[in-house]
């Protein structure tokens, strides 16, 4: 993936672009680190210390963004490798988050709300498509 500095930059960009909250990042990394385990909403809620409805929103958002997969019958969430590059990125995210938990958490908390980012993404998509 590159030098340590390039890696940190890629991880930071991933966090800024894709992660809305610390619990969302924690859920993604739990699923990543326990693959091929399937996680129920209740299990994830207990692991993250959040209510099941919050865990469900987090997991559904990760699934909607194709970071995790879901078994429709059992509503179990799991990591399914889509590319070596994605796997490598998540491995780096996991390692750097463990080393720099305060910095990464602060970066997540300092971001604009998810609603504002969604609005900006929609505008950016429209703008990019028109060019």
Image (cartoon, rainbow, N blue to C red):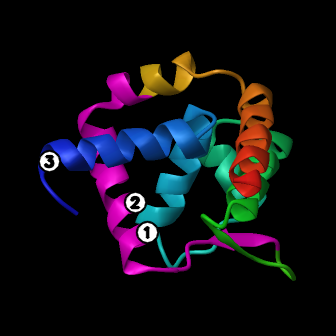
The residue drawn where x is 73% and y is 33% is 120
Mark 1 or mark 3, earlier in chain: 3
Mark 2 or mark 3, earlier in chain: 3
Measured in 3D between alpha carbons, the distance from the residue under mark 1 to the one under mark 2, in whole angstroms, is 6 Å
Residue position for label 2:
90
The residue drawn where x is 45% and y is 80% is 83
What secondary structure is found at the residue carrying circle 2? helix
Q: Position of residue 91 (x, y in %)?
A: 33, 61
User: Predominant secondary structure in magenta?
Assistant: helix
Q: Quadrant of residue 9?
A: top left
Kindly indicate whether the residue at mark 2 contacts the one at mark 1 (C-beta within 8 angstroms): yes
What secondary structure is found at the residue carrying circle 1? helix
**Which quadrant holds the N terminus?**
bottom left
Q: Position of residue 13 (x, y in %)?
A: 43, 41
Q: Up-down: is 67 above or below 80? A: above
Binning the other alpha carbons within 10 Å of mark 2 as few (below 14), some (14 to 19) or many (20 upward) gives some
Which mark, residue 86?
1
Residue position for label 3:
4
Binning the other alpha carbons within 10 Å of mark 1 as few (below 14), some (14 to 19) or many (20 upward) gives few
Q: Position of residue 26 (x, y in %)?
A: 52, 44
Measured in 3D between alpha carbons, the distance from the residue under mark 1 to the one under mark 3, in whole angstroms, is 17 Å
Using residue 107 as the reference point, say whether residue 113 is left or right of it.
right
Residue 53 on the magenta segment: no
Q: Nearer the viewer, residue 27 or 118?
A: 118
Measured in 3D between alpha carbons, the distance from the residue under mark 2 to the one under mark 3, in whole angstroms, is 15 Å
Residue 100 on the magenta segment: yes
Which mark, residue 76?
none
Using residue 105 as the reference point, say whether residue 121 is left or right of it.
right
> What is the magenta range?
75-104
Using residue 59 as the reference point, say whether residue 102 is left or right of it.
left
Q: Position of residue 11 (x, y in %)?
A: 36, 46
Q: Nearer the viewer, mark 2 or mark 3?
A: 3
């Amino acid at each position: 993936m590159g030098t340590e500095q390039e890696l940190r930059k890629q991880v930071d960009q991933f966090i800024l672009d894709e992660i809305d909250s610390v619990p969302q990042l924690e859920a993604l990394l739990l699923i990543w680190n326990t693959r091929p385990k399937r996680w129920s909403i209740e299990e994830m809620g207990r692991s993250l210390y959040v209510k099941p409805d919050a865990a469900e929103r987090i997991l559904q958002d990760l699934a909607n963004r194709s970071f995790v997969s879901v078994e429709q019958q059992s509503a179990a969430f799991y990591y399914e490798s889509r590319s070596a590059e994605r796997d490598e990125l998540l491995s780096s995210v996991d390692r750097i988050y463990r080393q720099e938990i305060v910095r990464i958490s602060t970066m997540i908390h300092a971001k604009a709300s998810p609603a504002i980012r969604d609005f900006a993404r929609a505008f950016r998509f429209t703008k990019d498509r028109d060019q």
